[in-house]
Image (cartoon, grey):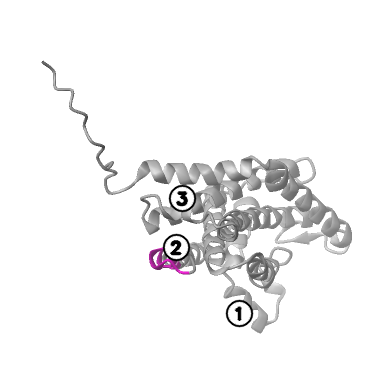
């Protein structure tokens, strides 16, 4: 006679990496911005086209060429990168701050996810949003700007590294923030100034020596410079140096975010 004794439930074994939980968290973050695509994808396209129109009309007649190419071709890669970076930051920072303010951050902390898996899961949503926005913005700029591709590899590398950098910065800022005013301060006093002083609208060889040095201390400069090189073949600094800076900054921010989750910094009562 068969044994019909019920088997008690046992803890689920996940192995070294909880792939199911990691995939679920990453997919949740991706679906989160896809659900409101008018705000998260198409709004940045309109903003970027307005930037292009304003600067092209205001400076196009006075500045015919920069970096050896027409001014609008020099400007376009920087605008694409700014849209990618700002949206990657917005995705992770808003997700964490909203969860903290609404009190449901526990839904992300209670599942059996390690601090590293939490960082990767949240960052994945920001990286995907940044890349999607960058691709859509680039496609929408094509009718107005002749975009040449000099090196797709450098475009892909800097697009990925920049989206990751801002996603990690958004995680750190979101964990640190206790209310919306705090993350708005990070956006207004850290992200926006670094973005506008990154060489998006100019080449640093025209700056005085002191300001040129200051620009080279700005990690946003390297992501703009390398990304632009992928389109127009012009760089203000060495590509190897820029790649090393991007990797080092991402590693540092990743370690910071991991440490925040590991300690439960401003996350646990």
How far apart in space, not on screen, are marks 2 and 1 (Cα)?
26 Å
Q: Quadrant of residue 194?
A: bottom right
Answer few, some or many: residues within 10 Å of disc 3's Cα (few below 14, many 20 plus, some between 14 and 19): many
Magenta span: 256-265
Q: Which mark is residue 213?
A: 1
Q: Residue at x 63, y 70 (%)?
A: 182
Q: Is residue 10 left or right of residue 230?
A: left
Say which element carries label 3.
Answer: helix
Percent position (x, y) of residue 260?
A: 44, 67
- Looking at this view, name the residue that lies furthest to the bottom: 210
Estimate the spatial distance between the alpha carbons at disc 3 and disc 2, rounded to whole Å: 12 Å
Sequence-wise, the earlier of marks 1 and 3 is 3
Pointer 3 or 2: first along the chain: 3
**Numbered badge on residue 254:** 2
Query: Would you identify the image quadrant in which residue 3 lies?
Result: top left
On the question of residue 229 being in view, the answer is no
Residue 166 forms part of the magenta stretch: no
Q: Would you name the residue on which mark 3 appears? A: 121
Identify the image quadrant of residue 201.
bottom right
Q: Residue furthest left?
A: 1
Q: How far across and how far down the image is residue 202, in percent? A: 72, 67
Question: Which of 82/63 is in front?
Answer: 82
Front residue of 228/90: it is 90
Residue 35 can be seen in this image: yes
User: Residue 120 versus residue 155: which sits nearer the camera?
Assistant: 120
């Amino acid at each position: 006679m068969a044994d019909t004794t019920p088997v008690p439930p046992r803890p689920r074994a996940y192995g070294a990496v909880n792939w199911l939980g990691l995939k679920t968290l990453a997919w949740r973050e991706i679906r989160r911005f896809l659900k409101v695509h008018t705000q998260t994808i198409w709004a940045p396209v309109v903003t970027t086209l307005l930037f292009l129109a304003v600067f092209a009309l205001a400076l196009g007649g006075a500045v015919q060429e920069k970096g050896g190419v027409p001014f609008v071709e020099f400007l376009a890669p920087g605008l694409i990168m700014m849209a990618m970076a700002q949206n990657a930051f917005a995705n992770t920072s808003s997700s964490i701050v909203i969860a903290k303010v609404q009190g449901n951050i526990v839904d992300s902390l209670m599942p059996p996810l390690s601090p590293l898996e939490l960082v990767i899961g949240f960052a994945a949503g920001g990286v995907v949003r940044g890349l999607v926005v960058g691709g859509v913005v680039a496609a929408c700029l094509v009718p107005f700007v002749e975009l040449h591709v000099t090196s797709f590899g450098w475009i892909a590398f800097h697009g990925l590294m920049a989206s990751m950098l801002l996603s990690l910065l958004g995680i750190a800022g979101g964990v640190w923030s206790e209310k919306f005013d705090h993350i708005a301060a990070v956006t207004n006093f850290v992200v926006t100034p670094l973005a506008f002083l990154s060489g998006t609208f100019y080449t640093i060889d025209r700056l005085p020596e002191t300001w040129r040095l200051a620009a080279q201390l700005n990690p946003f400069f390297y992501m703009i410079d390398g990304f632009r090189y992928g389109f127009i073949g012009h760089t203000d600094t060495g590509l190897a140096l820029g790649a090393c800076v991007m990797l080092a900054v991402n590693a540092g921010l990743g370690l910071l975010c991991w440490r925040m989750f590991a300690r439960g910094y401003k996350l646990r009562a």
